[in-house]
Amino acid sequence: MPAENTPSLIHHFLDKSAAKLPDKVAFEFSEQHLTYAEAAKQANKLAHLLVEEGVKAGDCVGVYLNKSLEIPVAVYGILKAGAVFVPIDPGAPPARVAFIIKDCQITHLITRPERRKSLNKALDEGAELKVVVGLDENALAGSDTRCLPWRSLQDFPDTAPSDKVKDHDLAYILYTSGSTGEPKGMMHTHSSGVAYALYSGITYGITPEDRMGNHSRLHFDMALFEFFTGPSRGATTVIIPEDAMLFPSSLAQLIEEKALTIWYSVPLALVQLITNVDLKSRPQPALRWVIYAGEPFPTKHMIRLMKIWPKARYSNVYGPAEVNQCTVFHIDPGKLNPNKPIPLGKVWDGATGRIENPDGSLTPPGEIGELLIHSKTMMKGYWGRPELTAKGIVMREQVPGIPIAFYKTGDLVQLDKEGLLHFHGRRDRQIKIRGYRLELDEVEHALHSIPQVQEGCAILHDLPSGEKALVAVLRLKEGATVEPGQLHKHLAKALPAYAIPQRTVFADDLPRTSTGKIDRRRLSSFVDSSNFEN
């Protein structure tokens, strides 16, 4: 990592670019924008407001926002106040929102008026808040929550408050699926975020001339590329509106009209462009680098995309949210085999990889084992879950006598003769669907809460089309019936949209092992021979 003039805190990136490039556009959303000077001043005002409203260094502050210019103001304002920002998925069910608020002991939250109704429902689920910034004074009538509209920021100074934290202090907590049916929060420090911004900025050569498309919502770790790396290099981040994300034709038009130079998303967004839009009519001359992560990209689609947009470079990025990014593979179009998956690549600078057998011994070269990662971008641990942290972060001696911390990814990999890592599935039952990480146990936990269900299983299943679908296999109680709409309505109360099974199979019984347990290995073939309910 470069040592000279390296910021120690994440919000220093914004301040540094505001000093060097005050009139440069930092963030765009639709027809609105914030320059670096404006973004820094708005963040400073929010920081002063939060401190006056009782936020102390190390407190968790919720960010409950749809795509908008308020997101960077919230993120950097919270950091400047010395607090920890906790993104909450605006599409999550009220029970999940309430859980995160309670679990992180959030008393202050940043939002916008369009989230008022869903926030009210979260309060009905038992969440308690002292202050909400972004709603009119009487928006939450009947509660003890104090609401402050965004215009309240104008009453506070726009000068930067003094720093209240060090680089080893927490900066943000990201929640992901948990095996107990409850989300788990990954704690990241300022040093983790700074390291990620610096390494990614160097890896992709980000400059002030770049225009980075922010496709992911804030609660998804991929969004940190635009919100951390962009400001660290003085680039412009274009926040992509929700409606443009829903329609591939609108998204292709936006990429062209906004002259995006850097694209980073899950493969699904790009595959939908390939299959639903005449991309040859939109050559995207400004686009210089296409980066994807979250799940494998079908090689046949990548070959097609590289032919349509031949001027861009392409990279496959891998890394659990616990370490953000840890490997990269820069794709050579001349070496792609349509019948083979794209490699994970090599561990990037600032990280060390280790491939282990189940007993902790090193896996011989060429054999499959679990990938462990030591990285400057690694999380501190799971919020309030020391037992889970102890399982996920282990000490290993890369150099005899010098133990260092590694994160156990749970991913099975193989190192080839060229030094490239290849993915070979999950060690446990954690999957990725549409770029989101998900514990199948969490889905099954929700399935079992449905009154009519006797037994339920969830699997990631390969469809004849080549796509992957989350499938629920259900055995109902005797005499019980349930309509697909009822299932969806019930599951939507407990699960985010991406975790709700896309297909359902009803069975009189489930495949079993000789001991009477459900034979999960046979579930896929069982599903193949069954009729789906959508």
Image (cartoon, helix red, strand yellow):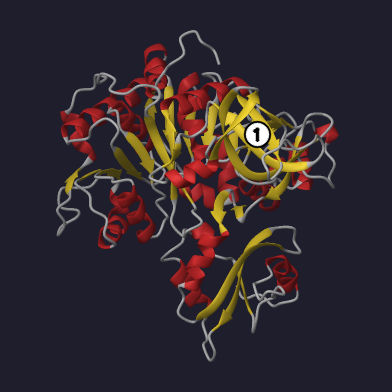
Image point (51%, 10%), residue name: 3
Residue 392 appears in which quarter of the rendering?
Answer: top right
Visible residue check, residue 92: yes
- Name above or below for residue 221 compared with residue 142: above
Visible residue check, residue 23: no
- Name above or below for residue 31 compared with residue 351: below
Q: Nearer the viewer, residue 369 or 444?
A: 369
Which residue position holds label 1? 290
Q: Amino acid at mark 1?
A: Val
Residue 102 percent location from the top left of the image: 30, 51
- Name above or below for residue 529 compared with residue 8: below
Residue 483 percent location from the top left of the image: 52, 81
Question: Viewed as shown, does residue 148 lie left or right of 118?
Answer: left
Question: Viewed as shown, does residue 68 lie left or right of 409?
Answer: left
Question: Viewed as shown, does residue 395 lie left or right of 95?
Answer: right
Q: Nearer the viewer, residue 177 or 249?
A: 177
Image point (21%, 28%), residue name: 48
Residue 189 percent location from the top left of the image: 42, 30
Residue 237 percent location from the top left of the image: 48, 30
Residue 13 appears in which quarter of the rendering?
Answer: top left
